[in-house]
Amino acid sequence: MPATPAWPPKSLPRLFVRRPLGEGVQVDLDANQANYLGNVMRLGVGAEVLLFDGRSGEWLARIGEAGKKRMTLGVEGKTREPESVPDVRLAFAPVKRAQTDWLVEKATELGVARLIPVMTQRTNAERVRLDRLEAIAVEAAEQCGRTALPDIAEPLKLNQLLCDRSRTLYFADEAGGTPAAEAFKPGPALIFVGPEGGFTDDERALVRAASNTVPISLGPRILRAETAALAALAAYMAIAGDWR
Ligand code: SAM
């Protein structure tokens, strides 16, 4: 993806569809999407829409048929190649629902490649609704111009997260570490942020002992978990990611 978004932004509606796109393909929208285009955006036959399928880039399509609860679009041509985002993943201990939703939305906008919920000892969310998080990521990707969605992984336990030693694990540790501005380097990255109650001493020791861990500090203040996650991701994108 270019470092500068196209400006002025194209005002065409953008939709994610769950079927492979290509020139000449006919796309039947689901009832929600048909309702959005027909009743909310007040678009009818002949109107243009941008579509993406998460793999093949972005496509211009035109409404061919429109009914009360259904709509068919014909794909006319490719408008953008598939995006390339930095290989950065964000592992986070789920927080309250509204804050987790916010985290997923903003991380998607910032270009995260994968989101990984991690159940730590002080995680106070009992379960994570992956379908809900995916719906939030879809909406954010539609709005911000991404041509792919971040993967949203099944929740992991801490020891499962630590199995992958193939990437640098930037461990946001409120107890201190290398300033993030100095620590972040280009290359496959995993940023790990803890829950509201922070990490236990055992967890901190376990994460710090992993050979790929780089403990980082996000400044002199204790940030809320979701603020810490987004601050770390934005700093990574600025220093080692796609803002360079
Ligand atoms: N309850 C903990 C305490 O009082 O020490 C604070 C936890 S903080 C609200 C939630 C998470 O955000 C932490 O586990 C850490 O991953 C991250 N975090 C917050 N502020 C940070 C900072 N200044 N440096 C590094 N990580 C930070």
Image: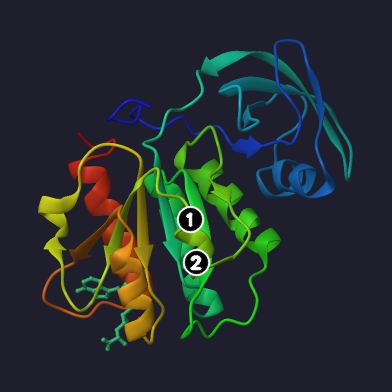
Residue 27 horizontal side relative to residue 213, left or right: right
Q: Is residue 143 left or right of residue 191?
A: right
Instruction: State the image quarter where residue 197 is shown.
Output: bottom left
The residue tagged 1 is: 163
* Above-or-below relation of 158 to 196: above
Secondary structure beneath label 2: helix
Q: Which residue is mark 2?
A: 159
Q: Is residue 154 above or below residue 24?
A: below
Which residue is nearer to you in this view: 88 or 16?
A: 88
Residue 102 located left or right of residue 185: right
- Give the amino acid at mark 2: Asn
* Residue 60 horizontal side relative to residue 24, left or right: left
Rendered residue at 78%/16% (across/down): 25
- Please identify the quadrant where the N terminus is shown: top left
Q: Residue at x 83, y 34 (%)?
A: 71
Q: Position of residue 203 (x, y in %)?
A: 38, 77
Q: Residue at x 20, y 48 (%)?
A: 184
Image coordinates for residue 123, horizontal then vertical, percent: 50, 82
* Inter-mark Cα distance, 1 to 2: 7 Å
Q: Amino acid at mark 1?
A: Cys
Q: For mark 1, does the 10 Å Cα neighbourhood hold few (<14), some (14 to 19), or many (20 or more) residues?
A: few
